[in-house]
Image (cartoon, helix red, strand yellow):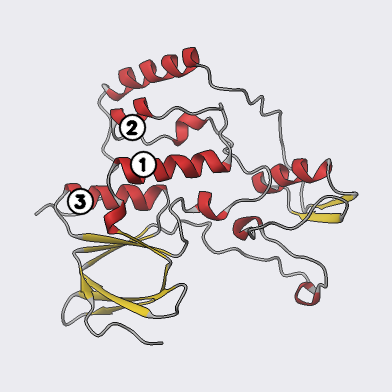
Amino acid sequence: MPSNDAPTKVDVLVVGAGFGGLRALDTMRERGYSSVLLEAGHGVGGTWYWNRYPGARVDVESLEYSYSFRDDLQQEWRWSEKYAGQSEVERYLNWVADRLQLRPAIRLGRRVRSMDFDEATGLWRSAATVTPGGDDEVYESPHVVLATGFLSVPTLPAIPGINSFRGELAHTGEWPDPGPQIEGRRVGVVGTGASGVQVIQECAGKAVHLSVFQRSANWCFPLRNQPMGPNERYSHSKSFVVKAALPVARRDIVVPRR
């Protein structure tokens, strides 16, 4: 693959444009470090960009998904539901990227394929493949923040014959766009974790037949989701201001200041 002759030199290279990556990029900028964020997808959101399966939504209250390091972010955004769906969380992260003016430092469609540390120079040399196109970009930096999380690599179960399955196969962590047709088809769901429980509920009323395969039973209870009214939003926002005033331990990424 062709690559740029001269590498892009930055103080910090951030990989991943989810919650952690956006926060890391903002922190590096605040501390005066030149930074670039590389993201394999063509939009910010991390898990909430890739996980587009039917029924995907948060399983803790939406307000717990709000960044709490800045009061203005907490106060300005208005969640529409107590438990937000995937598209709303993705919109929130796009709003944060715009609100904090992070986009100039974000490079979408860059999948990091190699990282090598040069002990002589003390620099990381990272190569990323650009999609579409297939060209390579090279970056050199003394610091790297891998905000890739533990959900970024979909894993298929080691079921004999899965590679020769002649039907349509989809993974919740890498849902195709457009997604597979569910209506009027026989559907099997493997797994009953949070994603499995959510997609099962969406398929149950649409598939002509649904089979669920689980290793062990999960414990679930009704979500009791509901719209977030102005009174509830005000109550939570007011509570946040009080809590934010209390002394708490710093949990920021530790990078030496200049």
Q: Earlier in the sequence, mark 3 or mark 1?
A: 3
Query: Left or right of 134: which side holds 73?
Result: left
Which residue in the structure is indicated by mark 2? 73
Q: Amino acid at mark 2?
A: Leu
Residue 178, position as x, y percentages in the image: 66, 57
> Disc 1 on helix, strand or loop?
helix
Residue 258: name its quadrant: bottom left
> Of helix, strand and loop, which one carries label 3?
helix
Give the side of residue 258 with respect to residue 229, left or right: left
Residue 160 appears in the figure: no
- Left or right: residue 213 versus residue 119 is right
- Residue at horizontal 65%, vertical 44%? 194
| 8 is higher (above) or lower (below) than 242 | below
Residue 236, image x and y in percent?
43, 19
- Mark 1 in CB contact with mark 2 (< 8 angstroms): yes
The quadrant of the rendering that contains the N terminus is: bottom left
Spatial CA span between label 3 and label 2: 17 Å
Residue picked out by circle 3: 29
Report crowding for label 1: few under 14, some 14 to 19, many 20 or more residues within 10 A (C-alpha): many
**Residue at position x 23%, y 73% in the image:** 8
Looking at the picture, which amino acid does disc 1 mark?
Val
Earlier residue among tags 3 and 2: 3
Estimate the spatial distance between the alpha carbons at disc 3 and disc 1, rounded to whole Å. 15 Å
**Circle count:** 3
Q: Residue shown at 28%/30% (left/top)?
A: 248
Label 1 and label 2: CA atoms lie apart by 8 Å
| Residue pointed to by mark 1 | 96
Q: Amino acid at mark 3?
A: Arg
